Amino acid sequence: ESPETIIVERRERVGLITLNRPKSLNALNSRLAVEVLAALNGFDADAQIGAIVITGSPRAFAAGADIAEMAEKSFFNFYMDDFLAPWDKIAAISKPIIAAVSGFALGGGCELALLCDIIIASEDAQFGQPEIKLGILPGIGGSQRLTRAVGKSLAMDLVLTGRTIGAAEAKAAGLVARVVPAADLLQTALEVAHTIAAYNAPAVKMAKEAVNRAFEGSLADGLRHERLLFQSAFATEGQKEGMNAFVNKRAPVFRHR
Ligand code: HXC
């Protein structure tokens, strides 16, 4: 069954997911959640893919969870149907995911960007957690991931007032990695993804795992975990190739199965 709410493509070793509900500014309904997760799982399991890009439209990455769908939901629906569970599972994807954000990234849209590993924004991107205006609060990790990304004071400001910030402020706060002109957004995100996808795949997976450890447990545990992964990288063919290439002053060629 082909997806209805997203477009799934491959560009060489990069998987590209485009959110595609233009009439509602890519509002994240439950079907879209299931389709995004299925596409991510497919790419994660595919040895031909080394990195993933998620993007939206020029006007909106995503304007949040689908308010029309949520409006009549009860506590019982959310709790018993585990309506938000697909979003949690994105955190288990092992390949790097780049969010290419243009226009609105609000509420669940901002949280989806935060679930990705690198956020690249166009100059006109707008980030915010406006849930408070709807009588609710962030529900797919915003209170935690936004706070870790930008610190307590700005996270409280955004979550409690519902105001949005532009790309420049988001960059200054550490929420986004790079800001580029709108016309260059997808190209830049794909280039970053192609760069990552060309590297030693086990080292890429280990590097993502190691950085993510910085958000769990103690510094000592994180450092111990990094050390084990670092040592493990020497069991990979790509380490031999990367270092041999450097010593012999040539470009490395990493083999991908
Ligand atoms: C459903 C949405 C939507 C949303 C926009 N639309 N956002 N539909 N859910 N989150 C629809 C509008 O109803 C409208 O449909 C069409 O998209 C275009 O939007 P407009 O409002 O006409 O555009 P504009 O005036 O440019 O304003 C853009 C906007 C505004 C500022 C982004 O749409 C807005 O405030 N949207 C809601 C943002 C928000 O509150 N997000 C948080 C949701 S809660 P029609 O049919 O009228 O053309 C959330 C919780 C996450 O995300 C945690 C739990 C999953």
Image: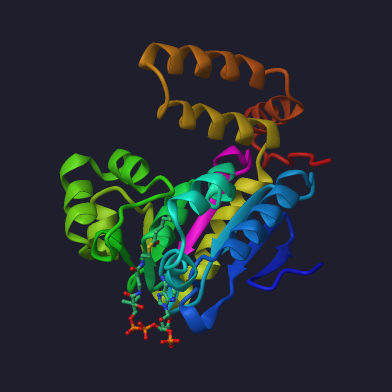
Q: Relative to 18, is 114 above or below?
A: above
Left or right placement of residue 199 versus residue 132 in this view: right
Number of dots carrying numbers: 0
Left or right placement of residue 118 versus residue 132 in this view: right
Q: Which residues are magenta?
A: 90-101
Between 13 and 132, the one lying in front of the other is 132
Please give the name of the residue rendered at 24% of the width and 65% of the height, measured from the top-left corner.
Answer: 133
Q: Does residue 94 appear in the picture of this structure?
A: yes
Q: Relative to 27, is 96 above or below?
A: above
Please give the name of the residue rendered at 54% of the width and 66% of the height, measured from the top-left corner.
Answer: 29
User: Where, quadrant-wise, is the N terminus in this rendering?
Assistant: bottom right
Does residue 95 show up magenta in the picture? yes
Between 182 and 76, the one lying in front of the other is 76
Query: Splitting the image into four quadrants, where does ligand 1 fall?
Result: bottom left
Left or right placement of residue 39 versus residue 140 in this view: right
Please give the name of the residue rendered at 38% of the width and 52% of the height, measured from the top-left corner.
Answer: 177
Residue 69 image point, x, y percent: 50, 69
Please give the name of the residue rendered at 72% of the width and 66% of the height, measured from the top-left corner.
Answer: 9
Residue 104 image point, x, y percent: 37, 71
Between 231 and 250, the one lying in front of the other is 231
Q: Relative to 114, is 166 above or below?
A: below
